[in-house]
Image (cartoon, helix red, strand yellow):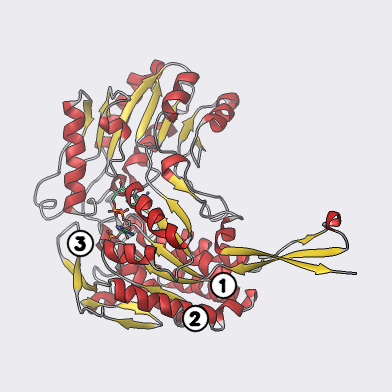
Amino acid sequence: MQHRPLTTRPAFIDTLDQDMLIAGKRVPALSGKRFETRNPATGELLAQVAQGSEADVDLAVKAARAAFEGPWRRTKPVERQHILLRLADLAEANYEELALLDTLDLGAPYARTVLGKARAAALLRYYAGQATLIAGDTLDNSAAGDVLSHTLKEPIGVVAAINPWNGPIGMSVWKTAPVLAAGCTLVMKPAEQTPLSALRFGELCLEAGVPEGVVNIVTGLGDAGAALSAHPDVDKIAFTGSTGVGQKIIQAAAPTMKRVTVELGGKSPNIVFADADLDKAVPAAATAVFANSGQICSAGTRLFVQSSIHDEFMERLAAYTRTIRVGDPLDPETQIGPVVSGPQMDRILSYIDGAAAEGGTLLAGGERLSGESYDNGFFVAPTIFADVRDEMTIAREEVFGPVLSAFTFDTIDEAIARANATEFGLASGVWTRDLATAHRMARAIRAGSVWINCYQMLDPGVPFGGYKRSGFGRESGPHHIEDYLETKAVWIKLD
Ligand code: NDP
């Protein structure tokens, strides 16, 4: 299927000045300040976005608190379900526009961003179902005498969502859906590089019947996120982003005991055993790391290939990688666009230089792309280093770009030990036809997701999150909603 957008500039950004969404109104920052967001493929100015700071965050939290204490926390689950279902329909109906905003803001190919439509709608419909499943327990505590106890599940209150730039609309939907299902209210801060689709999604929330003040969007820089995570009237923070900022958020949340869940960086192993189906494993190993220009927290950045197939596998992978089309994100043939910004590109190129200096063997890429269609953007060629050693910088740190480190291994025990020898634990892949190997690896790997003979699968009904420094808490799945609820025990003396 060819995915070509109907326009190259959605009407939403005909208004160059984009305001925040607070209490149901689009408003400028109190300071009047704005920051620019530009297309990383061309440098084109997309919008001048309200630069919210501490005072704007305070207004948004007040609006969220007022909406929470107003009728919203007492809405019937079936009403919230209805709103979520309407929002799912609206997100579907407007997804081409949301996807195009992300393509312009982030640089990800439109052919990729538009495919997020099915997941966004499925997420909203899944949480619509969750809204009506919230229930406490009746507890027979005979040891305490003639007493009946039951638990009430109550919405936790005002939630702050602080989002990264690598999947803007998908992240906005993922963060908003459980909030609405649980009866909480939201102040969301999108990343400064990619604020546009969140603002459009906020408008769709209002159109779906979400009451004013239930969903607020504060655009701004890191200081707005910091103000949000320290605000005394925020009850919970849901954060996705870098491990460093995650640590700051946990510290900022501590004085007021906010509930915190953090989904952070990764250095995920993708392990190919000699009996794997190489026709599937080769392209999947490339997609696992190069999709979205490598800007995915769960990217399979450490490729372990069993020694007996190593040379053949790497040859095929390098050949496949050279066929990947990098270029204009609006061209339906493009598989990889630019990286998100100049600083991000410089960071990636310095990792590439470092890997070469430390002795990695360059099999593909290794450079910024140049030429007429590349020079105004931040394009990095998909890059593969073989002969990487576990102690090299590129083997340990999250690059967040289209750069693969490849290793060879001999035994399953060695694969387990080296796959786990990282401070991260977000995801992993295993390629084998042997059932025992698959099960053994699934149990031995210390990571929140183990994909066997596949990679990067996500589903609203399946939990996703990290071990170790990849964070804590799980998003999606039947228990996620618990993070947005308090449990209250009620005791009734019967005699
Ligand atoms: P950050 O973790 O720096 O930013 C994520 C969000 O946190 C943004 O909205 C950011 O705002 C906000 N923020 C920044 N500083 C603070 C603070 N002190 N308190 C609260 N919120 C804050 O990620 P970046 O977007 O800068 O990316 C840097 C690196 O993080 C990447 O190269 C990658 O390694 C990793 N990363 C991991 C992701 C993942 O999914 N695990 C996703 C994105 C990045 P602002 O945008 O204004 O700075």
Q: Answer left or right for 64 relative to 314.
A: right
Pointer 2 or 3: first along the chain: 3
User: How far is the residue under mark 1 from the one under mark 2?
Assistant: 10 Å
Q: Residue at x 26, y 78 (%)?
A: 29
Q: Residue at x 41, y 57 (%)?
A: 239
Residue type of the residue flagged with mark 1: Gly
User: How far is the residue under mark 3 from the one under mark 1?
Assistant: 36 Å
Which is in the foreground here, disc 2 or disc 3? 2
Above or below — where is 378 with respect to 436? below
Residue 205: % across, % down: 45, 76
Kind of element beneath mark 2 = helix
Q: Nearer the viewer, residue 453 or 461?
A: 461
Residue type of the residue flagged with mark 2: Ala
Above or below — where is 495 with respect to 278? below
Residue 367: % across, % down: 15, 38
Q: Quadrant of ligand 1?
A: bottom left
Pointer 1 or 2: first along the chain: 2
Pointer 3 or 1: first along the chain: 3
Q: Answer left or right for 408 relative to 118.
A: left
Residue 176: % across, % down: 47, 67
Above or below — where is 279 with respect to 19? above
Residue 293: % across, % down: 28, 47
Where, by quadrant of the figure, is residue 77 drawn? bottom right
Q: Nearer the viewer, residue 362 or 485?
A: 485
User: How far is the residue under mark 2 from the one under mark 3?
Assistant: 35 Å
Which residue, given by chain and number where applicable, does mark 1 sit on? 183
Residue type of the residue flagged with mark 3: Asn
Circle 1: is it few (<14), some (14-19), or many (20+) Cα within 10 Å? Answer: many
Q: Answer left or right for 333 relative to 146.
A: left
Which residue, given by chain and number where applicable, does mark 2 sit on? 67
Which residue, given by chain and number where applicable, does mark 3 sit on? 39
